Amino acid sequence: MVIFSAAGFNNVWVLSISSALAGSLITLMLLAGSLAGTNLAPTPDWATAPIALMIAGTAMAVIPVTHCMRRLGRKSALLVFMLASALICTLAILALQLHSFSLFCITTFILGFCNAALLQTRFAAMESVAVEHGTTAASMVLAGGIIAAFVGPELAVIGRQLTDIDYQGSFALAALCTLFAALLLSLYRPAAININTNPRTETSALTLLSNPSLCLAVASGAIAYIVMSFVMTGTPISMHHFHGHSLVDTKWVLQSHIAAMFLPSFIAPILFKHLNIRGMMLAGLVCYCGTIIIGFTDTSVGGFWLQLVLLGIGWNFLFVAGTALLPLTHNDKDRFKAQAINDSVVFTLQAVAALGAGWAINLLSWQQMLVGCLIPIIMMLTVLLWERGKTPLLNPAN
């Protein structure tokens, strides 16, 4: 296609690959974090605390990171946070050396700030191209996550026994990968956008949230992450510790899940053309229901693999649809505020879900955990129907 040779899409490719390589530290933490947390935590109930704190850090960092992007620009801010990620790896190595659960939790919390910056790359990509190609640009950045899906867990397994202490080598390899991502990002050329930074010219948050379509966009991203995080965070512990599946099988299931989160992005423009934004949201909810049904009946490696793949696809449909709808709900002068509102809500609720997974997996069965996911699914369907009644569809693409 011609658009992929355009100058703006050169930026998109750079952002996709560099953010994916830097994001491999996040996917490494999703596997190693909960397993290392199990060994370090004072009680099993706190095994997922490192992951929950990483997500909490992401939620708390959204507004500061947004201001940083506004002040320094996308490129400079991203470089700062990528270099910080490499330093965080050394802190994780020290925490493992000292066998300190509290220091490891502090490490993951700080890592959340870097993750919040990486998540802004989807908006940077959309700004690099024409409005009509925004969905394609965002999908390409998300598709780059396939690299992170395989690189991160592979680094976790390869580096696990490079030293006498499990996973120290994994974080050392992740630091090198992050530094390479920062080097690649130097090729990024930010789009020149006229931004009025006077806060008095911006619309208030309450006024923005009075728009039903913006509420739907936020809800779509939030529900996508709540269900995905709740199930995915509990999977390594459920598979490896409770159901006795090997670390290799657990790694493969997690890699397949993360790949499934991003593979649909390659065909996102086609899906949007035929399903429209709200149709994509419904398709995502159907995938989540499939996850519950399969997980309820099959806890074999194959069962875990299929439910986690459906979980990833459902996340992609809901999150990409919410991302695509968000820019259509506000003026350009309000874009940083709308993005901050969106990501703050999404990742705060994701943190609650991740922490709740550690509690739930020790009190409930795997099947009971999955059934509990019906609550946010029903809530999302309710918001979708409410917004449909409040906002007549004038544009079939929506």
Image: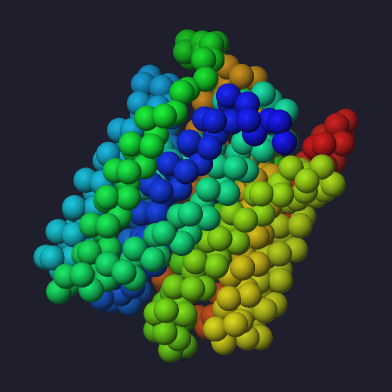
> How many numbered marks, from 0 up?
0
Residue at 47% over, 22% down: 190
Q: Which residue is drawn at 67% across and 38% down?
A: 136
Q: Quadrant of residue 388?
A: top right
- Observer able to see residue 391: yes
The quadrant of the rendering that contains the N terminus is top right
Q: Nearer the viewer, residue 165 or 340?
A: 165
**Residue at the image position 58 percent from the left and 17 percent from the top:** 333
Residue 206 visible in the shown view: no
Q: Quadrant of the C terminus?
A: top right
Residue 1 to residue 197: above or below: below
- Quick check: 83 left or right of 8? left
Residue extending furthest toward the left: 98
Q: Is residue 294 above or below residue 118?
A: below
Vertical relation: 168 (above or below) 301: above
Residue 364, percent across and down? 50, 81
**Colour treatment of the image:** rainbow
Find residue 90 and report its horizontal and vertical position in percent: 19, 52
Q: On the picture, is 301 further left or further right than 310? A: left
Q: Where is residue 123 in the image (x, y as percent from the top left)?
A: 55, 32
Locate residue 205 relative to residue 398 in the image: left or right. Answer: left
In this view, the residue in front, 168 or 311, is: 168
Tell me what residue is drawn at x 52 percent, y 26 percent: 336
Q: Position of residue 366 (x, y in %)?
A: 54, 80
